[in-house]
């Protein structure tokens, strides 16, 4: 941000003694510009005015910090560019000298002997008329940030400084302020760093937990960690993040002072070598950016250092920093060694190596395998290839499907989206394969005719409704006016439900021992939310329709410490090494709802049943957050823990149309666009095991759900 300081010209009263110089600005107006190097890491001696830029507030804050002030104090030039020029030229003759001082309150100090103790005098401008000619003015940061001889090094208490232009009638003893450029965002105070940490060696990573200091909390910007291995080299080939702090070593090759050790809260639990300030690797002790191995936001209470090697001891330093790049660092006083663990996917594969994830587009979305739905789809593909048009369609599928398959392999979200989009297409393909194209077209034509006839019947019913209503002998329990309103509506077109129920995936089926891998790792099930959305059509026998349902299930637990082959000891948890199983059940189902009990006889009960295909997408995350892998026996054959199982689902339940209890609520609901609202409960049975495919996870369950539903 460029700050123009309009400086009011002052008419200086002439002293009685004619020998006193006069400094009249003659109605002119001055301006002051402060610029910093465009590349702060460049050698200041090799830079010219063109290499300096007008800084933003963030730039100024990061440049005028403790490290650069200290470097300038130690003799390594850290410069800024100051320029004084006419914004409005004088309208009358001007003579005299201008004095440049940095500090605060320089003009208020009337004793010229005391002023240098708290202010620094810069080279003056000998002739006011030469203001525009004095353009190459490089000044030292230290004179700006630590002005005067009273300052001992760089004072962390300085929060605002000024670059001032003054005139004088007595040779510089008494100063009259002509303009100030004030920087009131100076920060040279290093933030506090957590003094106590808890280290968790995990699989492929280390997590440092800490309590954030409570003093000056608004000053934090980031926490960063630096890691080194035993030979003193960085933990990674390249740094994981750019440095958000400035050290004197990085700015001007002045060594950083000796680091202090943090207190390791769980010292007795950590098996590692003792680390001292003297034993720190040289590059790590100087906080060189090549060692940066992790970063967390200012509000964090832990920092995870990923991408590390199991069985390798690491030395770790924690650094806290503020917006200005000031920092404080402490090292962990013991080496920390990540250890391999056995996650759910590895445990499951150790017991049954046949279980696997998925491949190509259909397989990336619906899982691999030669039987079940994939076998049927492949057979259908082979049938299509027997015709020219079918062969063209198959070729287009492989041409367009490859990039989608890659996306599905890399992203769980992509798999969910593709699964939802492709589920109707897969259903059509399976029907095509089962009954043939002519029969499928005939079925589609019959459905179209049935829908047309149904519309005609509805139109006739609406036409005859007044006569039928007059002849009807019974009246629903809500008033006649509301009943008349209901005749004018076409009936609900959509049914939406939101339900919650317990879910325990049948992973531990007959293919596994007792207890199975799921029970060993996660124990029991958990609550699963789900939603249903069906397009419905009214008939004399109630509503019929089709739609989709999907839910979300998540279970987490600490992974196991690996055991030697053949060990019969119960598995032992590895604290902090949390792995997770995620399941997204997706269902494509037909539905029947017995709405005639309510619509015809006024009984607010709606029995219903639905059933169809279920596709349950699943994935397993290992402790470092990546997809789990099982690698038996050759690493290049590692199978990622992501896939899906296809099967059948069915449910039966009872819904209560709650608006029938209160006519006023019913009318208000109708006015808002809802036809019905209520509660429902159901029993659901899912056989989701890839239609018996031995390579698929079995994810079905027999359970119950309860929730609320709406018709509109």
Image (spheres, rainbow, N blue to C red):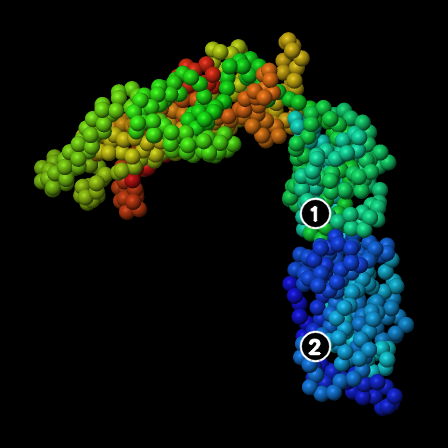
Q: Give the image quarter of residue 303.
A: top right
| Residue 617 in the image, given as x and y percentages of width and height | 45, 27
Q: Is residue 344 visible?
A: no
Q: Residue 393, how many percent across, how many down?
A: 34, 30
Q: Which residue is mark 2?
A: 86
Tell me if mark 1 has few (under 14), some (14-19) or many (20+) residues whose alpha carbon lies within 10 angstroms of its own: many
- Coordinates of residue 174 in the picture (x, y in percent): 84, 78
Describe the element under mark 1 as helix, strand or loop: loop
Tell me if 452 is positioned left or right of 193 in this view.
left
Q: Residue furthest front?
A: 388
* Label disc, if present, on residue 244 of the rendered structure: 1
Is 171 on the left-hand or right-hand side of 330? right
Q: Secondary structure at mark 2?
A: strand
- Quadrant of the frame with the C terminus: top left
Residue 252, visible in the rendered structure: yes
Classify 414 as above or below 525.
below
């Amino acid at each position: 941000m460029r700050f123009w300081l309009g400086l009011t010209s002052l008419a200086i009263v002439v002293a009685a003694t004619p020998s006193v110089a006069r400094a009249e600005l003659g109605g002119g107006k001055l301006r002051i510009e402060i610029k910093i190097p465009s590349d702060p890491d460049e050698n200041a001696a090799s830079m010219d005015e063109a290499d300096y830029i007008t800084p933003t507030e963030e730039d100024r804050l990061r440049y005028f910090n403790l490290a650069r002030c200290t470097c300038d104090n130690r003799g390594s030039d850290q410069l800024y560019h100051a320029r004084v020029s006419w914004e409005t030229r004088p309208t009358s003759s001007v003579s005299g000298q201008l004095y440049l001082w940095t500090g605060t309150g320089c003009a208020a100090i009337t004793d010229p002997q005391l002023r240098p103790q708290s202010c620094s005098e810069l080279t003056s401008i000998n002739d006011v008329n030469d203001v525009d000619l004095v353009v190459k003015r490089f000044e030292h940061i230290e004179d700006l940030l630590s002005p005067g001889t009273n300052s001992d090094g760089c004072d962390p208490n300085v929060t605002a400084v000024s670059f001032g232009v003054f005139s004088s009638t007595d040779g510089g003893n008494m100063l009259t302020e002509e303009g100030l450029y004030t920087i009131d965002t100076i920060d040279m105070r290093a933030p506090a760093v957590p003094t106590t940490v808890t280290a968790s060696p995990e699989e492929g990573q280390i997590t440092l937990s800490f309590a954030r200091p409570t003093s000056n909390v608004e000053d934090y910007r980031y926490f960063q960690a630096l890691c080194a291995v035993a030979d003193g080299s960085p933990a990674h080939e390249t740094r994981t993040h750019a440095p958000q702090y400035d050290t004197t070593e990085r700015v001007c090759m002045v060594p950083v002072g000796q680091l202090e050790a943090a207190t390791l809260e769980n010292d007795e639990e950590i098996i590692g070598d003792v680390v001292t300030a003297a034993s720190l690797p040289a590059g790590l002790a100087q906080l060189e950016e090549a060692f940066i191995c992790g970063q967390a936001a200012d509000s964090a209470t832990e920092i995870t250092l990923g991408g590390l090697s199991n069985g390798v001891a690491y030395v770790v330093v924690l650094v806290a920093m503020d917006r200005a790049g000031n920092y404080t660092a402490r090292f962990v006083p013991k080496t920390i060694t990540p250890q391999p663990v056995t996650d759910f996917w590895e445990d499951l594969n150790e017991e049954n190596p046949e279980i696997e994830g998925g491949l190509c587009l259909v397989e990336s979305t619906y899982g691999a395998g030669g039987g079940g739905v994939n076998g049927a789809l492949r057979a259908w593909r082979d049938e299509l290839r027997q015709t020219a048009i079918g062969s063209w369609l198959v070729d287009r599928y492989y041409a367009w499907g490859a990039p989608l398959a890659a996306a599905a392999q890399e992203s769980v979200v992509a798999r969910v989206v593709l699964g939802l989009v492709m589920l109707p297409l897969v259903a059509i393909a399976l029907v095509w394969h089962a009954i043939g194209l002519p029969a499928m077209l005939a079925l589609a034509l019959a459905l179209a005719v049935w829908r047309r006839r149904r519309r005609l019947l509805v139109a006739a019913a609406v036409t005859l409704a007044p006569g039928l209503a007059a002849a009807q002998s019974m009246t629903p329990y809500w008033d006649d006016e509301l009943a008349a309103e209901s005749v004018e509506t076409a009936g609900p077109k959509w049914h939406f439900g939101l339900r919650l129920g317990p879910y325990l995936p049948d992973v531990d089926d007959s293919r596994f021992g007792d207890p199975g891998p799921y029970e060993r790792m996660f124990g029991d099930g958990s609550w699963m939310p789900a939603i249903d959305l069906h397009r419905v059509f009214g008939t004399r026998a109630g509503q019929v329709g089709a739609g989709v349902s999907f839910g979300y299930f998540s279970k987490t637990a600490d992974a196991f410490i690996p055991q030697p082959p053949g060990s019969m000891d119960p598995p032992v948890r590895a604290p902090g090494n949390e792995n997770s199983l995620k399941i997204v059940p997706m269902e494509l189902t037909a539905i029947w709802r017995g709405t005639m009990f309510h619509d015809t006889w006024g009984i607010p009960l709606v029995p219903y049943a639905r059933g169809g295909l279920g596709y349950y997408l699943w994935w397993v995350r290992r402790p470092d957050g990546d997809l789990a892998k099982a690698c038996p026996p050759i690493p290049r054959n590692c199978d990622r823990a992501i896939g899906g199982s296809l099967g059948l689902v069915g449910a039966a339940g009872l819904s209560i149309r709650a608006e029938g209890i209160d006519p006023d609520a019913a009318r208000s609901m109708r006015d808002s666009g809802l036809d019905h609202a209520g509660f429902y409960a159901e029993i659901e049975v899912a056989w989701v095991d890839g239609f018996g495919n031995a390579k698929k996870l079995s994810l079905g369950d027999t359970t119950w759900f309860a929730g609320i539903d709406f018709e509109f």
